[in-house]
């Protein structure tokens, strides 16, 4: 596969020609098809940066921040070095540290909870819903109330929530924000996978107090390297984020008023992202068409000769009404772990790459062992981790390839 979600491999370049792994018939994510469309704009934008030479905090950063803030519908955007730094900076802006509890989901990429621990605060995991794979608001409020009953110093105090828009589908922010207001907590939207998604008439990245997105190459709006952005309507938070991004600077860079980080977005990445953003809204619609084709193919009745279980053996993703996913991943559920292994093997033999996001929930990762969780603590996350896997997904995926993919489900079980 040209690119898995978390790794991109270096390879020799033939512009617009995909170089596949041996035996592969298609890419998991196809960045070459996209590059072919916008190569001239990318070349020009890169040449402009080489010409003006403002590699750090050049004018493209401000331009990208303004364009993306307008698209998302929030007042302020702050470019930063990665989605992980965006989350870290958001927590730092709220002064999160030891003794603070931050509620989040165990069914996410490690970065979501890693930044909480990095600041000495305590991640408190809350299980997900089985349909959206996003944090369950009912369980969230129970966890908050339970912790509030245990006074410090034995337990950390509830301080904030990081909800994740997994696979590109926004979490239930109407419920989450209401819970946060009742308990005086802040809400951070981990929108690393959901830039371009919608909830009602609002866009992802506008759904909480601060939103954080990622420009990792495989994300819906990906650059050609690391990058990220924060979004907020809060003027006060904006000033603090600007300061944190550049070593806690005050009036100028040699006045330091707080502990910050080197969290800047590269000018070069901003220049590339400006070219990519020009076709992004169209790509979001292309993603809808690809997802709709999958849904039709996966829910079609098994043809004569196909085994009965074939067409019904996987559950396609469900988008609740009023929501629009940006389909960072097209993740489906097999009936159990063994069925998943058989399906993945059959797809692999047919030259079709698949991936598992995520095979192990965070509460069972060694990195979080000190939190004292055990198997069985979050049954929905654990079951999904055993059954879920993702099919190739990108705006340029062709119908014929999707038919080939879905045909495998007819013959496998
Ligand atoms: C990708 C991702 C991140 C981290 O983004 P980077 O830009 O890779 O640092 C954080 N949270 C989620 C849910 C992600 O998918």
Image: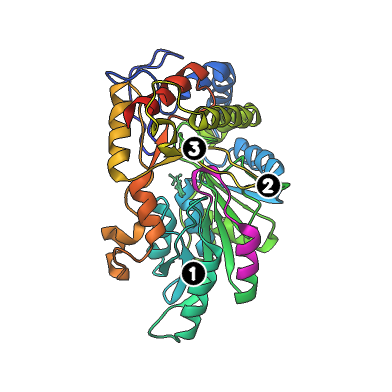
Local secondary structure at mark 3: loop
Q: Is the N terminus in the top left, top right, bottom left or bottom right quadrant?
A: top left
Q: Residue at x 45, y 71 (%)?
A: 97
Q: Residue at x 38, y 63 (%)?
A: 378
Q: CA distance from mark 3 to mark 2?
A: 23 Å
Q: Quadrant of residue 72?
A: top right
Q: Nearer the viewer, residue 58 or 211?
A: 211
Please state the total of marks drawn on the protein image: 3
Residue 323, horizontal then vertical, whole percent? 64, 46
Name the N-terminal-most of marks 2 and 1: 1
User: Which is closer to the viewer, label 3 or label 2?
Assistant: 2
The circle drawn on residue 219 is 3
Residue hosting label 1: 96
Magenta span: chief secondary structure: helix
- What range is drawn magenta here? 165-179
Q: Is mark 3 within 8 Å of ligand 1?
A: yes
Name the N-terminal-most of marks 3 and 1: 1
Name the N-terminal-most of marks 3 and 2: 3
Residue hosting label 2: 322
Q: Nearer the viewer, residue 346 or 181?
A: 346
Q: Residues within 10 Å of mark 1 (few under 14, many from 20)?
A: many
Q: Residue at x 47, y 23 (%)?
A: 402
The answer to whether any part of residue 358 appears in the image is yes
Query: Mark 3 near mark 1, Cβ–Cβ under 8 Å?
Result: no
């Amino acid at each position: 596969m040209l690119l898995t979600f978390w790794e991109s491999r270096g390879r020799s370049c033939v512009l617009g020609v995909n170089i596949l792994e041996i035996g592969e018939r298609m890419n998991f994510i196809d960045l070459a098809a996209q590059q072919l469309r916008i190569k001239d704009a990318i070349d020009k934008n890169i040449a402009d940066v080489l010409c003006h030479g403002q590699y750090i905090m050049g004018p493209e950063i401000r331009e990208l921040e303004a364009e993306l803030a307008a698209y998302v519908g929030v007042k302020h955007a702050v470019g930063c070095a990665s989605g992980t730094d965006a989350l870290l900076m958001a927590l730092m802006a709220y002064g999160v540290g030891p003794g603070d509890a931050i509620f989040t989901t165990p069914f996410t990429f490690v970065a979501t909870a890693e930044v909480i621990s990095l600041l000495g605060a305590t991640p408190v995991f809350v299980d997900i819903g089985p349909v959206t794979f996003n944090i369950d608001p009912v369980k969230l409020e129970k966890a908050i109330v339970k912790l509030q009953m245990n006074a410090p110093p034995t337990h950390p105090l509830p301080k904030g929530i990081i909800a994740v828009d997994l696979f590109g589908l926004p979490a239930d922010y109407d419920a989450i924000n209401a819970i946060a207001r009742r308990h005086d907590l802040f809400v951070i939207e981990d929108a690393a996978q959901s830039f371009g998604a919608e909830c009602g008439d609002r866009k992802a990245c506008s759904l909480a107090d601060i939103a954080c997105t990622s420009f990792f190459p495989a994300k819906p709006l990906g650059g050609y390297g690391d990058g990220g952005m924060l979004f907020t309507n809060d003027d006060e938070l904006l000033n603090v984020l600007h300061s944190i991004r550049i070593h806690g600077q005050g009036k100028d860079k040699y006045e330091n008023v707080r502990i910050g980080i080197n969290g800047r977005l590269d000018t070069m990445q901003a220049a590339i992202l400006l070219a990519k953003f020009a076709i992004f809204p169209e790509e979001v619609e292309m993603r809808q068409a690809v997802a709709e084709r999958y849904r039709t193919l996966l829910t079609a009745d098994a043809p004569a000769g196909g085994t009965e279980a074939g067409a019904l053996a996987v559950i396609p993703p469900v988008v609740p009404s009023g929501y629009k996913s940006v389909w960072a991943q097209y993740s489906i559920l097999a009936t159990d772990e063994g069925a998943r292994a058989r399906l993945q093997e059959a797809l692999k033999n047919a030259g079709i790459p698949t991936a598992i996001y995520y095979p192990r929930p965070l509460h069972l990762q060694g990195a979080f062992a000190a939190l004292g969780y055990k198997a069985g603590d979050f049954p929905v996350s654990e079951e999904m981790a055993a059954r879920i896997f993702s099919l190739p997904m990108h705006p340029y995926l062709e119908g014929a390839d999707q038919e080939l993919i879905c045909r495998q489900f007819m013959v496998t079980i």
